[in-house]
Image: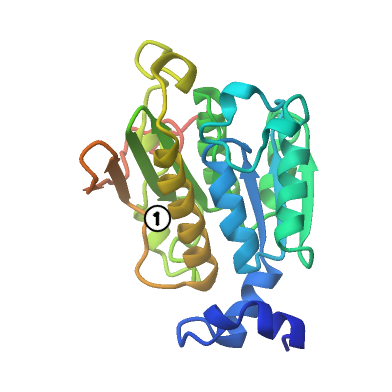
C-alpha cells in the first residue's frame, strides 16, 4: 500500500486507470539500469525518478565537461570536473529523495555486465559509443533483460526496444512472442566505424533532440514495467528533428544473426 507521501507525490499518475496504486507500486519495486549519464541519460533519469522508479543505477566513467552542457541537462557549470554518475545521482536524489540511486563511476565491461543486467528489470542504453551498444545488445539477449535503446546525432534520433531473450511484452508472462523478436544485432548487424557512425564530438548534436529521445526512453521503460499499451519490440522509431516528424520501421529476427540466430556464437 502506498504511503500518504507517495499518494500525494504520484497522485497525478496514480489516478490514471492504466496505472492506479497497483501500477505505482510496480514502479516503486522496479530496478532500472541507465548506461550513460549524458544527453540521453539526463532526461531519461529525471523522468524515471519523477515517475517513482524505486531503484535507479547509473553507470558512466566520464567527468562533466563544458562542451556537455548544451544537452546534458542534469549537469551544471559548477559541476564541471565532477564524475557524471555522481552528479546525476545527486540531481536525481534531489528530485525524488524517496528512491534509491546508485552511482557507478566505471565503464560497462565484461567484468560487470552480467551482474548489472541480471540484477535489474530493464536496462536503458544512453551510451555514446558503439562498443558499449553492441555489448549491451548481446548481453541483454543473453540474460533476457529488456533493452531500451536510444541514439541521437545532429538533428536525428532513434529509439527501439529489444527483448529477444525473454518475455517481450512487459506483462511478466512469457507468451512465446519473444521467440520471434529481433535482438540488437538483428537490426544493426555490423558494428560501424567512426566514419559510418560519427559521434557528437565529430558530427554535432542539437540538444533538444537528445531530450526527445531520452524522454521517450523513459516512457518506453515505464510502459515495459507496467505492461502498458502494445509492445514496442520489433519496431525502430526514427525522429527527424529538422522536420519535426517521426517514422516507424518494422524489424524482424534474422536467422543468420550471430547473437540470436541459428548457430549463434553469442558475440
Q: Quadrant of the N terminus?
A: bottom right
- Could you say whether the residue bearing mark 1 is in a helix, strand or loop? helix
Res. 264 image quadrant: top left
Here the colouring is: rainbow
What residue is drawn where x is 38% and y is 62%?
Answer: 177
What residue is drawn where x is 49% and y is 62%?
Answer: 167
**Would you place residue 174 above or below residue 47 in this image?**
below
Name the residue nearer the viewer: 72 or 185.
Answer: 72
- Residue designated by label 1: 179
Name the residue nearer the viewer: 240 or 175.
Answer: 240
Q: Residues within 10 Å of mark 1 (few under 14, many from 20)?
A: some
Q: Is residue 266 visible?
A: no
**Would you place residue 83 above or below residue 250 in this image?**
above
What residue is drawn where x is 39% and y is 18%?
Answer: 203
Q: Residue furthest front?
A: 77
Left or right: 34 with respect to 247?
right
Q: Is residue 261 visible?
A: yes
What residue is drawn where x is 51% and y is 56%?
Answer: 218
Residue 36 in picture, x, y percent from top left: 61, 36
Residue 185 in picture, x, y percent from top left: 41, 34
**Would you place residue 243 above or below residue 2 in this image?**
above
Amino acid at each position: 500500500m502506498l504511503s500518504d507521501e507517495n499518494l500525494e507525490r504520484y497522485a497525478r499518475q496514480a489516478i490514471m486507470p492504466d496505472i492506479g496504486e497497483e501500477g505505482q507500486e510496480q514502479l516503486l519495486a522496479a530496478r532500472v539500469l541507465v548506461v550513460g549519464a549524458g544527453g540521453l541519460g539526463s532526461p531519461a533519469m529525471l523522468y524515471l525518478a519523477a515517475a517513482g522508479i524505486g531503484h535507479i543505477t547509473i553507470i558512466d566513467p566520464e567527468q562533466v565537461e563544458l562542451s556537455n552542457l548544451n544537452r546534458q541537462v542534469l549537469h551544471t557549470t559548477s559541476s564541471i570536473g565532477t564524475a557524471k554518475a555522481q552528479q546525476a545521482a545527486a540531481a536525481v536524489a534531489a528530485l525524488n529523495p524517496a528512491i534509491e540511486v546508485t552511482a557507478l563511476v566505471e565503464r560497462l565491461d565484461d567484468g560487470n555486465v552480467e551482474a548489472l543486467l541480471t540484477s535489474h528489470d530493464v536496462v536503458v542504453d544512453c551510451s555514446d559509443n558503439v562498443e558499449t551498444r553492441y555489448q549491451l545488445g548481446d548481453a541483454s539477449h543473453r540474460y533476457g533483460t529488456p533493452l531500451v535503446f536510444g541514439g541521437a546525432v545532429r538533428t536525428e534520433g532513434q529509439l527501439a526496444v529489444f527483448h529477444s531473450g525473454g518475455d517481450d511484452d512487459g506483462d511478466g508472462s512469457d507468451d512465446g512472442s519473444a521467440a520471434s523478436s529481433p535482438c540488437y544485432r538483428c537490426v544493426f548487424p555490423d558494428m560501424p566505424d567512426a566514419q559510418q557512425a560519427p559521434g557528437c564530438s565529430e558530427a554535432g548534436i542539437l540538444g533538444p533532440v537528445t531530450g526527445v529521445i531520452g524522454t521517450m526512453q523513459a516512457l518506453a521503460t515505464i510502459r515495459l514495467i507496467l505492461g502498458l499499451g502494445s509492445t514496442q519490440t520489433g519496431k525502430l522509431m526514427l525522429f527527424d528533428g529538422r522536420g519535426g516528424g517521426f517514422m516507424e520501421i518494422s524489424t524482424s529476427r534474422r536467422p543468420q544473426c550471430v547473437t540470436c540466430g541459428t548457430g549463434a556464437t553469442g558475440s
